[in-house]
Amino acid sequence: MQHKSWIILFLALIIFGLYSQTLDNPLVFDSSNILKFLNINDWGSVSFLDYRIFNHLSFYIVHQIFGDDLFWQRFFNVVLHISNCIFIYLLMIALLKYFSKNTIESIDHYIAFGVAILFGVHPVGVYATAYLIQRSILLAAGFSVLALLSWLRGCCENTNQAINKWSLLSLLCYYFAIHSKEHVVLLPLVVGVLIILSPINRKILFKNNIVYFSLSFIMALQVVFKLRSILTATIYEPTTQEMILGATQITQTSAIQPDLFMSIQNQSWMFFIYLKNMIFPYSQNLAIDLQYPFELKLISWPATLFFIIYVSIPFILFVLWRFIKLNKLIILSFMIPWVLFIAEFSVVRFTEQFVLYRSYSWMIGYPVFMFVLLKLLYDRIKNKKMVMGVLLVLLALLSWQQQKILPTFVNQLALWQDAVDKNEKKGLQSKRNFRMYSNLGASLMQDGQTTRAAMYLKKAISLNPEYVVPRHNLASIYLIKKDYHKAIAEFESALKINKDYPSTYYNLGLAYEAAGNLEEAVLSFEKMIEYEPNHFDALFQLGLINQKLKSYQASIKYYIKVLKQKPRSADIRLNIGYSYLYSGQKDVALKYFKEALLLKPHSKLIKKAIQIANEK
């Protein structure tokens, strides 16, 4: 196919144009966690065997080159997504060469290019690309496709070597993939599927890949050992144990603690929802958080049924292949997500059992599925224009749905309002919705919409009374509205649930101070500095309140600590001077007043303080 480079450039421009609106977005939800990756000071402790090391290094390297501007971090995410689309295009051609003896025609390139663009504009891809911290899944998916590409290239060149440069490259890409995000750890099984479906002698091909599988197995074991929890059915969410206490109200069933088998059944159900969203993406079914029911029965509808179907998929596909000669690429398109999804069974997902960004790596099967459908359509009608027309219609539909998703990442408020609206519209009402209500309430509070914020925060508290965050934020709203007694009550309720929540002590101190209870305010601020000894605002408030309480020595002690953090502050020196003056140490007071005047030579307040001191 001529001008292939121009085709790839066109693909890149389309996808970049669609995602360009996200490049200046702020950090949303847990994307702020990337900040800890930007400065890796102790290189001696960094190992290429570390958990998601290549993801972390990517944030660090981009930061070292471009600085603090998050535009470039987002730009790199989009570049990764575009690269993955190009890899998808190459994978389609490689698969066609692997399965077909026919010459690759220009229409094959056009269809491969078309499905690569479909992958690029797919709405689900937004949750991996625009959601900055999910770069790990972009990297893992990209390296996974490269691993498959390299393996296919090696097979097409030479099937008689146990190991060759291409299989080594494939193993290297697999290593990068699982050390970007461990969810693709079962990728070698996809290679196994390719061998089973191979048109050449499968026994020879399998024999030649024993070394390949052995080395990939060792790599997988290293990841499993590093994570440990991947095969231990650990409950993933930190707030889950609180939620289990109310399990009867969550599902109207008996309160059985979620175990691995229940999670596997529920996740099997989620697999088909993911699959539906891949093939028929509709923006109303996509959100940052969708709380589908978690069934707490050993046998339940529809979870048990979908578990049986999920387990049966390989057998069903095998039967269809053997008896009706089902197209091998269709089999592969379903087996890719089926195999990679198995990693989801490694933990009990109770609150986060349906999270769209994780499906990005399983979506490798989507372009394979679309490729074979369009290829079969062309083989039937032999009309390039009609096939291209179908592609354009699909592209328009996907782009339309994608453009409904992208604006939800413009800020926290848009993201969580979208999630709450879609959960309520779909009737997904459960006690597990507490987090999205809490996050929406916090976002509304930051936006100044305190009345609406309080409404959602109260919803979050009613759904999960043991969750501290909404109580803390609701108390902060009462503090803003100067309803100090309600603020104090909520802050104290939060501390009864979790005493190790330092910022609550600080805000409780502010509430007590505003209510005129200075002694309790001092106790709260002192508790705050037990957790954070150098907390500037708490130390300053302790200096100020002790001054009001005429505990001048205590006031001086705290003000001195504050001054060490801001040694050029005239105002702190002025306050220290007054504490010394009121404690009878006029000379020391004058010393601090004069130092303050040197820093603020035109300050009337400082000149007045010096005058008062001289008159004493």
Image (cartoon, rainbow, N blue to C red):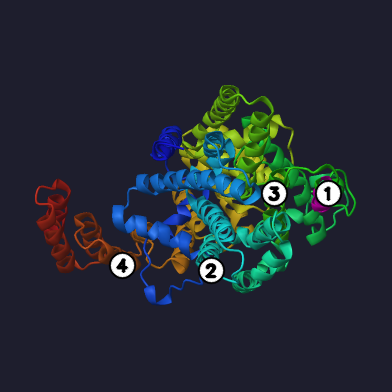
Side of 411 relative to 125 (left or right)? left
Secondary structure under the numbered disc 3 in the rendered image: helix
Is residue 316 found inside the magenta-colored segment of the image?
yes
Q: Mark 1 = which residue?
A: 322
Is residue 323 found inside the magenta-colored segment of the image?
no
- The spot of residue 265 in percent (x, y) is 81, 52
Judge whether 102 appears above or below 141 on screen.
above
Q: Amino acid at mark 1?
A: Arg
Residue sitting at x 45%, y 48%: 80
Asked whether disc 2 touches disc 1, contact meaning CB atoms under 8 Å apart, the reply is: no
Task: Judge whether residue 465 can be spotted in this image.
Answer: no
Q: Amino acid at mark 2?
A: Asn
Range of residues picked out in magenta: 309-320
Q: Residues within 10 Å of mark 2 (few under 14, many from 20)?
A: some
- The spot of residue 469 in percent (x, y) is 58, 50
For the residues labelled 2 and 1, the Cα–Cα distance comes to: 32 Å
Side of 168 relative to 537 (left or right)? right
Q: Mark 4 = which residue?
A: 561
| Number of on-image labels | 4
For the residues labelled 4 and 1, the Cα–Cα distance comes to: 79 Å
Q: Amino acid at mark 3?
A: Leu
Q: Quadrant of the C terminus?
A: bottom left
Secondary structure under the numbered disc 1 in the rendered image: helix
Side of 452 relative to 202 (left or right)? left
- Residue 205: image quadrant is bottom right
| N-term mark: 4 or 2 | 2
| N-term mark: 2 or 1 | 2
